[in-house]
Image: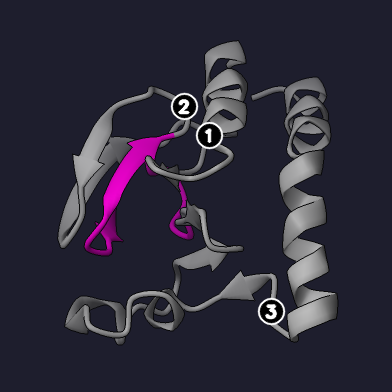
């Protein structure tokens, strides 16, 4: 992803980011959340150290090893959509997705109120 795409993605996420920040201000919820915060009954979420939820609806799995073009990611028990490809996944297991430079694994909850926004972002890239 070129820097311009990153900037466009950041800008396109503005409505969602505003909602996440409002939750932080009004409810004291962190913007960056551990998976178990929203999936306390999913035992697989408790040992995850490198993935996080941004708000309730975006799961981010940074690629922290150099040279990786694919990445394994645990998805909590929910219905997830890969932001960049639109591929649907049922959570509760680890999945492997392509992770080229600039497109780290990001998933959104399929039933998110922001699903159409996320879908538009993914379609642009």
In the image, is 12 to the left or to the right of 56? right
Check residue 103 in the rendering and tell me which mark sits there, or answer none: 1
| Residue 87 lies within the magenta run | no
Q: Is residue 69 visible?
A: no
Give the number of marks: 3
Give the spatial CA distance, label 2 vs label 1: 7 Å
Expressed as whole percent of the image width and height from the top left, the position of residue 58 reads 52, 52
In the image, is 62 to the left or to the right of 110? right
Expressed as whole percent of the image width and height from the top left, the position of residue 63 reads 46, 53
In the image, is 40 to the left or to the right of 77? right
The one nearer the camera, 117 or 101, is 117
Residue annotated with mark 2? 84
When asked about the image quadrant of residue 42, the answer is: bottom left
Q: Residue at x 31, y 85 (%)?
A: 40
How would you rate the neighbour count of disc 2 (Cα within 10 Å): few for under 14, some for 14-19, many for 20 or more? many
Quarter of the image containing the N terminus? top right
When asked about the image quadrant of residue 8, the answer is: top right
The one nearer the camera, 86 or 19, is 19
Give the spatial CA distance, label 3 vs label 2: 25 Å
Tag nearer the camera, 3 or 2: 3
| Residue 75 lies within the magenta run | yes
The magenta region covers: 64-82
Expressed as whole percent of the image width and height from the top left, the position of residue 32 reads 63, 71
Closer to the chain start, of discs 2 and 1, is 2
| Secondary structure of residue under mark 3 | loop
Check residue 30 in the rendering and tell me which mark sits there, or answer none: 3
Is the Cβ of the residue at disc 2 closer than 8 Å to that at disc 1? yes
Closer to the chain start, of discs 3 and 2, is 3
């Amino acid at each position: 992803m070129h820097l311009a795409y990153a900037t466009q993605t950041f800008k396109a996420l503005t409505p969602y980011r505003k909602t996440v920040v409002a939750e932080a201000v009004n409810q004291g919820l962190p913007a960056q959340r551990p998976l178990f915060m929203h999936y306390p009954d999913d035992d697989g979420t408790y040992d995850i150290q490198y993935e996080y939820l941004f708000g309730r609806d975006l799961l981010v799995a940074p690629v922290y090893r150099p040279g990786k073009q694919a990445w394994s990611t645990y998805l909590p028990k929910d219905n997830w959509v890969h932001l960049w490809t639109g591929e649907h996944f049922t959570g509760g297991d680890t999945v492997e997705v392509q992770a080229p430079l600039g497109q780290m694994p990001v998933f959104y909850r399929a039933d998110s109120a922001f699903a159409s926004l996320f879908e538009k972002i993914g379609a642009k890239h």
